[in-house]
Amino acid sequence: MKLASLVQGGRDGTLVVVNRQLTQAVAVPNIVATLQQALDGWADCAPRLTEVSARLNDGGCSDAFDFDARHCASPLPRAYQFLDGSVYLHHMEKARRARGVAMPPNHETEPLMYQGLSDSFHGPCDDVPFASEALEIDYEAEIAIITDDVPMGVGAAEAAHHIKLIMLMNDWTARALTRSELPKGFGFVQSKPASSFSPVAVTPDELGTAWRDARVHLPLLSFVDGERIGCPNAGDDMFFSYADLIAHAARTRRLAAGTIIGAGAVSNRDPATGHGCIAEVRVDEQAEHGEPRTPWLRFGTRVRIDMLDASGQSVCGTLDQRVCRAR
Amino acid sequence: MKLASLVQGGRDGTLVVVNRQLTQAVAVPNIVATLQQALDGWADCAPRLTEVSARLNDGGCSDAFDFDARHCASPLPRAYQFLDGSVYLHHMEKARRARGVAMPPNHETEPLMYQGLSDSFHGPCDDVPFASEALEIDYEAEIAIITDDVPMGVGAAEAAHHIKLIMLMNDWTARALTRSELPKGFGFVQSKPASSFSPVAVTPDELGTAWRDARVHLPLLSFVDGERIGCPNAGDDMFFSYADLIAHAARTRRLAAGTIIGAGAVSNRDPATGHGCIAEVRVDEQAEHGEPRTPWLRFGTRVRIDMLDASGQSVCGTLDQRVCRAR
C-alpha cells in the first residue's frame, strides 16, 4: 500500500491512497481523514485502506484522479515525534572528520540518535528556506520509517513488527551551526531545521524482497542540479537496523503512533557508490586535493532524492526541491 | 483564562475552561474540541474562550461542573514540539559538576536548549513508570510556555507576543543515562523520558504583575514525600527569558502553534530557596559532607510541584505523582 497527504483540508493534509505506479490516487473520506488518524487506529484502518489500494491497483476505483507529487505535503505534514539515528558509520566517520572530532563513545554497541523537530515538515516539492548561504547548507539523503504504538522496553525482534510505513527523507543541515551546537552536548536545534519527506509512504510489503532484516536493500539516489552525487545501497553498511533503532528509542519510554525514525545519511564504504551529502564529498576532496572543492548548496540549487525498485519504478516518488532565501 | 484537557474524547483529550480557583470547569464543544485545535486557530478561538472564562468566573455558566485534577491529562496530552532550555545557570553549574564536566561553550551568549520528546506526556496525577531504580530517577521542577505560530527569525521583543499559555512541568530525568548519553553530543533520548505538566495552563494575564520581562516572578514549590525540597523564585537568576528562548529556537525555522518551551530546572543562587531537583541536593551534600546523602527517587516516592500566587491560590494546579515500576 502507498499513501500520501495532499495539501488541503488543514494542517495535517488529506490522506489519499496512491497506486503502485504513482500515477493515480483516491481519497478515503469514508475511512479516515489524515495519515495521523490512520496511524492512531492502524489495526482498524490498515485493512480498509489495503482494500482500497488493491481496488485502485486493479483499476477498479471510478473516483481515482491523476496523482501529482507537487500537490503533496509530507506524508505526515507534522508529527508528534521524529528521531534520527546515525547508523551508517562510514558517514559518521566522515562527518566527524569534517568537524575535527572523534567518534562518539559506544558507537558500535548502541545507535547514535537525536530527537529531531517534527512540528512541520516541508512537502516533497516545496522550496526550502535558509536565511543565509553562510550557514553552509547541506542535504542528507535518508530513509525513515513510521511506527504504530510501541511499548516501553520493546526488544528488537518485536520492534520490527511496529514498522508500518517507509519513506525517503532529506535531512537538511546547516553545517556551520553543527560546529557550534554539537560541542554543547544537547543535540541539534538550530543546525537541523525542518526535514522533507518523499511524496509517498509505503508499507514494507511494497518493497518485496528488498525489505529484509528490517533494512531497505535498494540504492538511494541523490542529485544536485542534475548531477548524481551518489547511489549507496541503504542495506549495505547499515550497522544497526530500524528495529534496533526502535528498541533503542523505546528503552525508557513508549513511542506513540506516528513516530518517525530515520537512520542517518546513507553511505557505503565502496567509493563507487558516491556520497549522500555534500559534507562527505568535501571530506574526500580534502583528502585528495588538500582542500574541499564542491561548494555547499546555494540559493536556487535543486536537490533530488529518489529510490527505484528492480524494475526502475520509483518506490516513494521523488523529493525534488530548491534551496531558497528565507523571506 | 485557565484551560485544561480532560482524559476523554481521544488521544488529545477534551478541552475545558477552568475557573480562577480551580474548582469549576465547563466544556466548550461549540467552540473547539482540543487545546491543539484552539492553538491552531488561536486568533479566532481565544476571544471566544475568554468570554466563557469570564462567564464561568462570574458564576454564570449553568453547565459548569466540579473540576478534579485527577481527571486531567496534560493540557497538551501530546504536542508537535517540545524544546527545553537550561537558563538557570546555577542549576547548570550543579548538574555539570555532578557529571564532572565543564560549562558548555557560549552559555552566556546563547541559551542551551534541546529538542525533547512530545509524543505523549504524563497527566498531572499519573504514576510515572521507570524500568529500574538504578536509572537514578530524578525530577526537575520547571515552568514552560506554549506558543502560537512563530515565524522564522523572530526577534526576542516580537517573540514575547507569541507566548499564549504558561504551565508547570516535571522534567523527569534518568541521571544514570545522562552520563553515557550527553558525551555523544546528540542530546537526550533515553535519559529524558516523557515529562508531566500541571493540570491547568494559564494565559499570562492570569499572573498579573508576576508576569513581566517574559519571566514568571513567583516561587516554584517542590516536595518529595511531603518534604519541601525548594521554593526558588522563577524570576530570579533566569539568565535568558522565554522570549529569548523562542528567538533562539526560531533562528533557522518557524515554530508551529502548540510548541512547548521549558526553561530548565528553576534554581536560585540564594541557598535559602533550596533546590529544584535531587541532583542539586546531592551536589551540595557532596561539598558539605564529602558524599551525597539524599537518595535518588524510589518506586512509590511522591513528587509534588506547585506555584501559588500572592494570595496563596494555586495558579496552575498541582502536579502530584508517584514514581512506579514499569510493567
Image: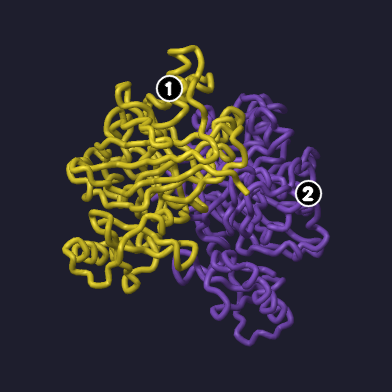
Chain colours: A purple, B yellow
Location of residue A255 in the rendering, given as x and y in whole percent from the top left corner: 59, 52
Identify residue type, mark 1: Glu
Front tag of 1 and 2:
1
Q: Secondary structure at mark 2?
A: loop
Location of residue B53 in the rendering, given as x and y in whole percent from the top left corner: 23, 62
User: Against B42, is A294 above or below?
Assistant: above
Q: Give the CA separation, mark 1 to mark 2.
A: 44 Å
* Labels 1 and 2 positioned on one and the same chain: no
- Where the N terminus of chain A falls, by quadrant? bottom right
Q: With A242 as the anchor, is B125 left or right in this view?
A: left
Residue drawn where x is 52% and y is 55% of the image:
A80
Foreground: B17 or B107? B17
Q: Is residue A175 in view from this perspective?
A: no
Q: With A36 as the anchor, is A269 left or right in this view?
A: right
Q: Dots 1 and 2: beta carbons under 8 Å?
A: no
Q: Which mark is residue B252?
A: none
Instruction: Find disc 1 in the rendering and name its residue.
Output: B93
Foreground: A304 or B125? B125
Instruction: Find disc 2 in the rendering and name its residue.
Output: A235
Location of residue B151 in the rendering, given as x and y in whole percent from the top left corner: 37, 50
Q: Is residue A30 in view from this perspective?
A: yes
User: Against A150, is B304 above or below?
Assistant: above
**What is the chain letter for disc 2?**
A
Foreground: B249 or A227? B249
Identify residue type, mark 2: Gly
Callout 2 environment at 10 Å: few (<14), some (14 to 19), or many (20+)? many
Q: With A191 as the anchor, is A90 left or right in this view?
A: right
**What is the chain letter for disc 1?**
B
User: Against B178, is B310 above or below?
Assistant: below
